[in-house]
Amino acid sequence: MAWFILIMAGMLICAAMAVVAKRLLVSAIWLAIASALLALLIYLLGAPELAVIELSVGAGLVTVLFVFAISIAGEEGHIHQSLLPKWLAGIVIAVSVGLIGWLCLPDLGFEMPQLVPTRLSTVLWELRGADVILQVILIFAGVLGVLGLLSGEQSTISKEPDA
Amino acid sequence: MTLSLVSLTFIAVIGLLAIGLYALLVVHNLIKVVVALQILAKGAILGFILAGRINGQIGLAESLALTVIIVDTIVAVIGLSLAVQIRHHMGTLDVSALTRLRR
């Protein structure tokens, strides 16, 4: 239980640091740490297969993509005024979080039920076969997206003049 | 008041969603926007796992969360490649500087 709270707090702090970090590369690394801690949390909740996938995809592949994109696009130097003032965004988020917590938390006081182990492979391949086809199509779309990421170098030649 | 494991996980879900939404509201850099979307998707994944654990259908929740993981990776790929292309064509990553009318 204490470990659970520690990992949870660490994950939330890492996610917040990823948002407030000034440099993009630092932000990507905080996101990777948050992802790894989320994988640990998922493992503790009793879904080890998904924890492995989250660890390898969320902390591995996505971080590589971020570092690659940042190295192509470069860091942005100056910081602008935000569209919405920060205090207003903070109030909006605090009010909605407070409302959700006030409505839902009293009903969630019960203990976690006993884990009923089911195999992910059985559910995925026998009950939700259409999902697998969808995932294959999505991965194909992702490959096309990576082509867009890679072609960033050549497109500088055909840069149109500013109107 | 002592918190159960269920309410603790729920607090984590709400915390992740709140951080992601706040980031979407205040962040200006296009790559930071993708980071915010990633944090939001993490909240959704944890919410799926919590719901499956309460229902006793953890396998179903895992298979749905797997789809969410794949979708949010693809969103990251497309978003980052859009950011790279915008950087090359407009010379900036700032969302508010992207309009051509004000310049």
Image (cartoon, coloured by chain):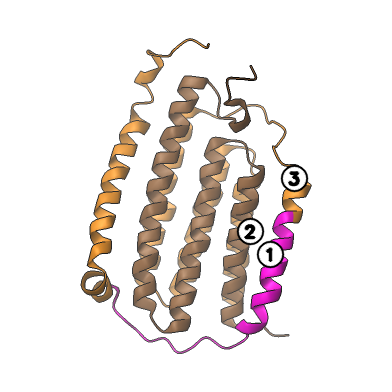
Marks 2 & 3 on one chain: no
Q: Which residue is mark 3?
A: A86
Crowding at dot 3, Cα within 10 Å, few <14 / some 14-19 / many 20+, comes out as some
- Say if the magenta span includes residue A100: yes
Do tag 1 and tag 3 residues touch (Cβ < 8 Å)? no
Amino acid type shown at disc 2: Ala
Q: Residue at x 34, y 76 (%)?
A: B59
Chain B, hue in figure: brown
Q: Position of residue A93 (x, y in %)?
A: 70, 57
Q: Residue at x 49, y 25 (%)?
A: B87
Q: Chain of mark 1?
A: A
Q: Chain of mark 3?
A: A
Q: Main secondary structure of the magenta part?
A: helix
Please identify the quadrant where the N terminus of chain A is shown. bottom right
Image: magenta residue range: A92-120
Q: Position of residue B68 (x, y in %)?
A: 40, 59
| Observer-nearest of B71 and A69 | B71
Q: Position of residue A113 (x, y in %)?
A: 48, 88
Q: Which residue is mark 2?
A: B18
Query: In what element is the residue under mark 3?
Result: helix
Q: Which residue is mark 1?
A: A97
- Please indicate, yes or no, whether residue A117 appears anywhere in the rendered image: yes
Do tag 1 and tag 2 residues touch (Cβ < 8 Å)? yes
Query: In what element is the residue under mark 1?
Result: helix
- Tell me: A88 left or right of A161: right
Query: In what element is the residue under mark 2?
Result: helix
Amino acid type shown at disc 3: Lys
Q: Position of residue A30 (x, y in %)?
A: 56, 50
